[in-house]
Image (cartoon, grey):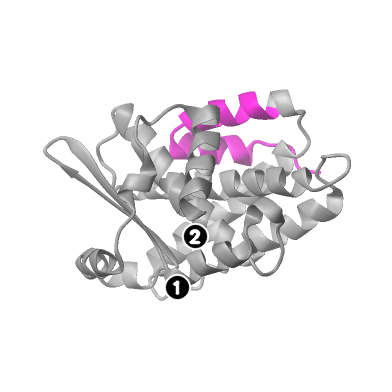
Amino acid sequence: MTMTLLREIQLLLERTYGETGVNFEEFLLSPSRNRTLSEMAGTSAAQISDLGRVFLRVVGGKLRLGIHYDASVIEALEKHNPAYGLGDDNILAFMVFIEELDHAVHAALKFHEGTRNIHNEQFVRDLELQAKVDTYLILQKYCAFFNNPQRVTDADRRWLKACVFDHDTGAFEDPRLARRYRETNKLARRYVAHLDRLSRKRRTAEIRQFRKLTYPQKRDRVAALRTW
Protein backbone atom coordinates (compact mmCIF):
# COMPACT_ATOMS: atom_id res chain seq x y z
CA MET A 1 0.00 0.00 0.00
CA THR A 2 2.71 2.47 0.97
CA MET A 3 4.59 1.92 -2.28
CA THR A 4 1.46 2.62 -4.29
CA LEU A 5 0.76 5.69 -2.17
CA LEU A 6 4.31 6.95 -2.67
CA ARG A 7 4.03 6.56 -6.42
CA GLU A 8 0.66 8.29 -6.45
CA ILE A 9 1.98 11.33 -4.58
CA GLN A 10 5.15 11.46 -6.69
CA LEU A 11 3.13 11.47 -9.91
CA LEU A 12 0.84 14.17 -8.54
CA LEU A 13 3.82 16.38 -7.77
CA GLU A 14 5.46 15.68 -11.12
CA ARG A 15 2.29 16.45 -13.06
CA THR A 16 2.30 19.82 -11.34
CA TYR A 17 5.99 20.73 -11.45
CA GLY A 18 7.88 18.47 -13.85
CA GLU A 19 9.23 14.95 -14.18
CA THR A 20 12.27 13.82 -12.21
CA GLY A 21 12.93 10.77 -14.36
CA VAL A 22 13.23 8.41 -11.39
CA ASN A 23 10.96 6.23 -9.25
CA PHE A 24 11.46 7.21 -5.60
CA GLU A 25 10.21 3.82 -4.45
CA GLU A 26 13.73 2.69 -5.34
CA PHE A 27 15.30 5.26 -2.98
CA LEU A 28 13.79 4.05 0.30
CA LEU A 29 16.37 3.32 3.00
CA SER A 30 16.53 0.50 5.49
CA PRO A 31 16.54 1.36 9.23
CA SER A 32 20.22 0.45 9.49
CA ARG A 33 21.20 2.66 6.56
CA ASN A 34 19.13 5.47 8.03
CA ARG A 35 20.98 5.19 11.34
CA THR A 36 24.34 5.30 9.58
CA LEU A 37 23.47 8.37 7.53
CA SER A 38 21.88 10.10 10.54
CA GLU A 39 25.09 9.66 12.52
CA MET A 40 27.09 11.10 9.63
CA ALA A 41 24.74 14.10 9.37
CA GLY A 42 25.88 15.58 12.69
CA THR A 43 24.33 16.94 15.88
CA SER A 44 22.00 19.49 14.29
CA ALA A 45 20.32 16.80 12.21
CA ALA A 46 19.66 14.84 15.41
CA GLN A 47 17.25 17.59 16.50
CA ILE A 48 15.03 17.07 13.45
CA SER A 49 12.16 14.60 13.70
CA ASP A 50 13.16 11.04 12.93
CA LEU A 51 9.68 10.15 11.64
CA GLY A 52 10.94 10.91 8.16
CA ARG A 53 14.26 11.91 6.62
CA VAL A 54 15.68 12.74 3.21
CA PHE A 55 19.45 12.49 2.72
CA LEU A 56 21.14 14.38 -0.11
CA ARG A 57 24.70 14.57 -1.37
CA VAL A 58 26.48 15.17 -4.65
CA VAL A 59 29.06 12.56 -5.69
CA GLY A 60 30.87 12.61 -9.00
CA GLY A 61 28.54 15.24 -10.36
CA LYS A 62 25.45 13.15 -9.57
CA LEU A 63 22.80 13.63 -6.90
CA ARG A 64 22.64 10.80 -4.38
CA LEU A 65 19.36 10.63 -2.49
CA GLY A 66 17.69 8.43 0.09
CA ILE A 67 14.31 8.58 1.84
CA HIS A 68 13.51 7.02 5.20
CA TYR A 69 10.18 6.66 6.99
CA ASP A 70 9.90 5.47 10.55
CA ALA A 71 8.03 2.22 11.04
CA SER A 72 5.32 4.07 12.98
CA VAL A 73 4.56 6.22 9.92
CA ILE A 74 4.16 3.19 7.66
CA GLU A 75 2.07 1.37 10.27
CA ALA A 76 -0.30 4.34 10.66
CA LEU A 77 -0.80 4.61 6.89
CA GLU A 78 -1.35 0.87 6.51
CA LYS A 79 -3.94 0.81 9.29
CA HIS A 80 -5.63 4.03 8.19
CA ASN A 81 -5.12 4.39 4.45
CA PRO A 82 -5.56 8.06 3.40
CA ALA A 83 -7.31 6.78 0.28
CA TYR A 84 -10.28 6.00 2.55
CA GLY A 85 -10.27 9.27 4.46
CA LEU A 86 -8.24 11.62 6.64
CA GLY A 87 -8.52 11.90 10.41
CA ASP A 88 -6.56 12.16 13.62
CA ASP A 89 -5.34 8.57 13.18
CA ASN A 90 -3.41 9.24 9.97
CA ILE A 91 -3.04 12.98 9.32
CA LEU A 92 0.38 13.37 11.00
CA ALA A 93 1.80 10.26 9.33
CA PHE A 94 0.48 11.37 5.95
CA MET A 95 2.00 14.83 6.40
CA VAL A 96 5.39 13.30 7.11
CA PHE A 97 4.98 10.99 4.13
CA ILE A 98 4.19 13.85 1.76
CA GLU A 99 6.80 16.29 3.07
CA GLU A 100 9.77 13.95 2.74
CA LEU A 101 8.77 12.85 -0.74
CA ASP A 102 8.23 16.50 -1.67
CA HIS A 103 11.79 17.30 -0.54
CA ALA A 104 13.08 14.54 -2.81
CA VAL A 105 11.08 15.67 -5.85
CA HIS A 106 12.05 19.33 -5.57
CA ALA A 107 15.70 18.55 -4.82
CA ALA A 108 15.84 16.39 -7.96
CA LEU A 109 14.17 19.06 -10.08
CA LYS A 110 16.53 21.75 -8.85
CA PHE A 111 19.52 19.52 -9.46
CA HIS A 112 18.33 18.91 -13.03
CA GLU A 113 18.10 22.68 -13.44
CA GLY A 114 21.70 23.22 -12.39
CA THR A 115 21.64 23.73 -8.62
CA ARG A 116 24.65 22.07 -6.99
CA ASN A 117 25.02 23.75 -3.59
CA ILE A 118 22.43 21.54 -1.94
CA HIS A 119 23.59 22.26 1.60
CA ASN A 120 23.21 26.02 1.29
CA GLU A 121 20.77 27.35 3.89
CA GLN A 122 18.63 29.04 1.24
CA PHE A 123 18.34 25.78 -0.68
CA VAL A 124 17.22 23.94 2.46
CA ARG A 125 14.73 26.66 3.37
CA ASP A 126 13.35 26.54 -0.14
CA LEU A 127 12.68 22.81 0.23
CA GLU A 128 10.95 23.38 3.56
CA LEU A 129 8.76 26.16 2.19
CA GLN A 130 7.76 24.11 -0.86
CA ALA A 131 6.98 21.08 1.28
CA LYS A 132 4.65 23.03 3.56
CA VAL A 133 2.77 24.51 0.61
CA ASP A 134 2.51 21.25 -1.31
CA THR A 135 1.49 19.23 1.74
CA TYR A 136 -1.38 21.60 2.44
CA LEU A 137 -2.54 21.47 -1.19
CA ILE A 138 -2.33 17.68 -1.44
CA LEU A 139 -4.23 17.24 1.81
CA GLN A 140 -6.92 19.50 0.38
CA LYS A 141 -7.30 17.14 -2.57
CA TYR A 142 -7.82 14.19 -0.26
CA CYS A 143 -10.33 16.08 1.88
CA ALA A 144 -12.30 17.26 -1.15
CA PHE A 145 -12.54 13.74 -2.57
CA PHE A 146 -14.75 12.61 0.31
CA ASN A 147 -17.05 15.64 0.27
CA ASN A 148 -20.29 15.93 -1.67
CA PRO A 149 -19.84 17.92 -3.81
CA GLN A 150 -16.09 17.27 -4.06
CA ARG A 151 -14.94 20.64 -2.79
CA VAL A 152 -12.89 21.76 0.18
CA THR A 153 -14.98 23.42 2.88
CA ASP A 154 -13.94 26.28 5.15
CA ALA A 155 -13.92 23.80 8.02
CA ASP A 156 -11.54 21.57 6.06
CA ARG A 157 -9.19 24.50 5.48
CA ARG A 158 -9.18 25.47 9.15
CA TRP A 159 -8.43 21.90 10.21
CA LEU A 160 -5.68 21.42 7.64
CA LYS A 161 -4.00 24.72 8.51
CA ALA A 162 -4.03 23.76 12.17
CA CYS A 163 -2.48 20.38 11.32
CA VAL A 164 0.14 21.62 8.86
CA PHE A 165 1.17 24.92 10.45
CA ASP A 166 0.26 24.86 14.15
CA HIS A 167 1.90 21.48 14.68
CA ASP A 168 5.32 22.90 13.69
CA THR A 169 6.43 25.04 16.64
CA GLY A 170 10.05 25.58 15.56
CA ALA A 171 11.27 24.57 19.01
CA PHE A 172 14.91 23.62 18.38
CA GLU A 173 18.05 24.05 20.45
CA ASP A 174 19.97 25.08 17.35
CA PRO A 175 19.04 28.75 16.63
CA ARG A 176 19.62 28.24 12.91
CA LEU A 177 17.08 25.41 12.77
CA ALA A 178 14.61 27.41 14.85
CA ARG A 179 14.86 30.39 12.49
CA ARG A 180 14.58 28.14 9.43
CA TYR A 181 11.40 26.40 10.50
CA ARG A 182 9.73 29.46 11.98
CA GLU A 183 10.32 31.52 8.85
CA THR A 184 9.30 28.87 6.32
CA ASN A 185 6.22 27.96 8.34
CA LYS A 186 5.13 31.60 8.50
CA LEU A 187 5.74 32.18 4.79
CA ALA A 188 3.92 29.01 3.75
CA ARG A 189 0.90 29.82 5.88
CA ARG A 190 0.62 33.28 4.37
CA TYR A 191 1.11 31.93 0.85
CA VAL A 192 -1.56 29.20 1.06
CA ALA A 193 -4.03 31.81 2.34
CA HIS A 194 -3.40 33.58 -0.96
CA LEU A 195 -3.76 30.35 -2.94
CA ASP A 196 -7.09 29.62 -1.27
CA ARG A 197 -8.51 32.75 -2.88
CA LEU A 198 -7.53 31.70 -6.43
CA SER A 199 -9.40 29.59 -8.95
CA ARG A 200 -7.96 26.13 -9.63
CA LYS A 201 -6.50 27.24 -12.96
CA ARG A 202 -4.88 30.37 -11.52
CA ARG A 203 -3.61 28.44 -8.50
CA THR A 204 -1.85 25.87 -10.69
CA ALA A 205 -0.21 28.59 -12.78
CA GLU A 206 0.79 30.46 -9.63
CA ILE A 207 2.48 27.54 -7.86
CA ARG A 208 4.33 26.52 -11.02
CA GLN A 209 5.76 30.01 -11.33
CA PHE A 210 6.46 30.16 -7.59
CA ARG A 211 8.54 26.97 -7.73
CA LYS A 212 10.91 28.53 -10.26
CA LEU A 213 11.79 31.44 -7.96
CA THR A 214 14.84 31.46 -5.70
CA TYR A 215 14.18 31.39 -1.98
CA PRO A 216 14.79 35.14 -1.53
CA GLN A 217 12.43 35.79 -4.45
CA LYS A 218 9.80 33.56 -2.86
CA ARG A 219 10.18 35.38 0.43
CA ASP A 220 9.70 38.72 -1.32
CA ARG A 221 6.77 37.36 -3.31
CA VAL A 222 4.96 36.24 -0.16
CA ALA A 223 5.77 39.47 1.68
CA ALA A 224 4.18 41.47 -1.14
CA LEU A 225 0.91 39.56 -1.02
CA ARG A 226 -2.17 41.44 0.10
CA THR A 227 -3.46 40.39 3.48
CA TRP A 228 -7.14 40.25 4.38
The secondary structure type at the circle numbered 1 is loop
Residue 145 sits in quarter? top right
Give the percent coordinates (x, y) of residue 99: 50, 52
Q: What residue sits 15% from the left and 35% below the top?
A: 61
> Looking at the image, which residue sits at the far front?
1
Instruction: Between residue 16 and residue 180, name the one nearer to us.
Output: 16
Does residue 40 sit above or below 95 in this rendering? below
- Position of 217 with respect to 116 (left or right) is right
Q: Which residue is drawn at 62% across and 67% down?
A: 167
Q: Is residue 12 above or below residue 43?
A: above
Tell which of 50 and 23 is nearer to you: 23
- Mark pair 1, 2: CA separation: 9 Å
Q: Can residue 100 be seen in this view?
A: yes
Classified by dominant secondary structure, the portion drawn in magenta counts as: helix
Q: What residue type is labelled 1?
A: Phe
How many labels sit on residues?
2
Residue 164 in which image quadrant: bottom right
Segment colored magenta: 203-228
Q: Few, some or many C-alpha atoms within 10 Å of disc 1 (few <14, some 14-19, many ≥20)? A: some
Membership of 177 in magenta stretch: no
Q: What residue type is labelled 2?
A: Tyr
Up the image or down, 153 lies above or below 164; here it is above
Q: Quadrant of the C terminus?
A: top right
Point out which mark residue 5 bears: none
Q: Are marks 1 and 2 in contact (CB under 8 Å)?
A: yes
| Residue carrying label 2 | 181
Tell me where residue 207 appears, x and y as whole percent. Answer: 59, 31
Q: Is residue 168 visible?
A: no
Badge 1 is on which residue? 172
> Percent position (x, y) of residue 189?
65, 51
Q: Residue furthest left?
A: 60
